[in-house]
Image (cartoon, rainbow, N blue to C red):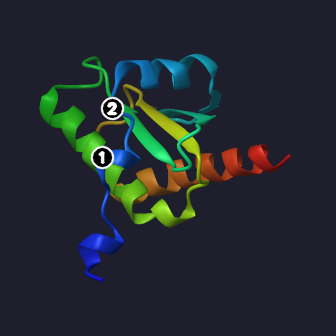
Amino acid sequence: MSVKGAEDFPKTARLRKRPEFLRVSRTGRKIHTANFLVISKANDKGKARLGITVSGKVGNSVVRNRIKRLVREFFRRRRHEWVPGVDILVIARKSAPGLSLNLIENELGRSLLSQRKGQKS
């Protein structure tokens, strides 16, 4: 299998429609970090899915798209660690611009670990 096939990030692994984002944001479990709000909710799809929201208040389109690319890359690399059947919504805060991939990995990695512990209990 090629590297692309092993670490791809298909559309089925993403939240794409507004009602999906709203369902997660209204009733999901929230974790606050310094630069992100991470919300998770179980789904009936059997797959983990990711949604990313970056407001215009965070920065211009270049800044917003960079944050989204880095968050997607973090999840793409660690997709095998996701709990199946959960939707995860990541909302960037105003303090998120300028973060490196390593800082995003550390921050989101800790928040997802705490969410997994919360789901087991």
Q: Counting residues from the N terminus, which is met first, the one under dot 1 or under dot 2?
A: 1
Q: Where is residue 15 shown, x and y percent of the image?
A: 39, 35
Left or right: 40 in relation to 61: right
Residue 12 visible in this rendered orientation of the protein: yes
**Given the image, on which type of amino acid does mark 2 rest?**
Arg
Q: Where is residue 25 shown, x and y percent of the image?
A: 53, 21
Which residue is depicted at the point 59% across and 53% down?
84
Helix, strand or loop status at disc 1 = helix
Which residue is depicted at the point 32% across and 28% down?
54
Viewer-closest of 23 and 117? 23
Task: Estimate the spatial distance between the alpha carbons at disc 1 and disc 2, rounded to whole Å.
Answer: 8 Å
Dot label at residue 60? none
- In this view, 10 is above or below 35: below
Residue 35 visible in this rendered orientation of the protein: no
**Which residue does the numbered mark 1 point to in the structure image?**
11
Within 10 angstroms of label 1, few (less than 14), some, or many (20 or more) residues? few
Which residue is depicted at the point 46% across and 44% down?
49
- In this view, 79 is above or below 36: below
**Given the image, on which type of amino acid does mark 1 rest?**
Lys
Q: Where is residue 21 shown, x and y percent of the image?
A: 44, 24
Outermost residue on the right side: it is 121
Helix, strand or loop status at disc 2 = loop
Q: Kindly check if marks 1 and 2 are in contact, taking CB atoms under 8 A apart as contact.
A: yes
Within 10 angstroms of label 2, few (less than 14), some, or many (20 or more) residues? some
Viewer-closest of 45 and 28? 45
**Which residue does the numbered mark 2 point to in the structure image?**
16
Which residue is depicted at the point 56% across and 49% down?
46
Left or right: 64 in relation to 113: left
